[in-house]
Image (tube, rainbow, N blue to C red):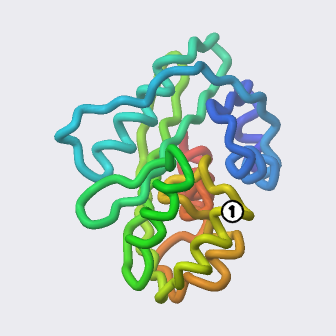
Amino acid sequence: MLSEILNKYKIILGSKSPRRQQFLKELNIAFESRTVDSQEIYPHHFKAEEITEFLAEFKSNAIKLSNNELLITADTIVWSNNRALEKPQDKKEAIKMLEELSNNNHQVITSICIATTKKTKVITEKTKVYFGKLSEEEIEFYVNHYKPFDKAGSYGIQEWIGLIGVTKIEGSYANVVGLPVQKLYTELKNF
């Protein structure tokens, strides 16, 4: 159904994320991946969705489009204690992030930029995630075995740590995995 609406476009996903690629496949959208390596830097005074909206659009602007192409880019952060937890640089930082999330709650914020040569729209989804108390051994096990260095906040809710640690979520589960699919689907239907 969505593929019929979008058949006038060649869909481009501006992401290397296997999770985002899988979601588009599950929506039955034919797409190609196209990315440009660039540093994701944003103004230091930005907070919460200001960061993700800026970065989603920044990624979009870095990719040149032809007339019949529709580009989807996204950015996700974990917003905890009034600051962004992005992808950890190393094991030590991953452990520190998970210790902060333990026995606490945070927001997962994803912004999506949908763009053609004529139109651009940025949408944002927020999900509140609650973690129970994680032991040092559980955190260490997860970081050693799952190596969450490509994940905002150092965790994947769909992985072991999510199964044993997440006690409740308020909002979109898919958003926490990496893409608010329902919101994207609705926007693409009406784009």
Is residue 186 visible to the viewer in this orientation of the structure?
Answer: no
Residue tagged by mark 1?
144
Where 27 sits versus 53, above or below? below
Disc 1 marks a residue whose amino acid type is: Asn
Quadrant in which the C terminus appears: top right
x%, y% of residue 42? Answer: 31, 32
Q: Which type of secondary structure does the marked residue at label 1 adopt?
A: helix
How many labels were placed on the picture?
1
Where 189 sits versus 138, above or below? above
x%, y% of residue 17? Answer: 68, 43
Q: Which residue is drawn at 49% across and 56% down?
A: 92
In terms of image quadrants, where is residue 36? top right
x%, y% of residue 130? Answer: 44, 81
Left or right position of 152 against 156: left
x%, y% of residue 185? Answer: 62, 53
Where 114 sits versus 69, above or below? below
> Quick one: 7 or 168, which is closer to the camera?
168
Left or right position of 43 against 16: left
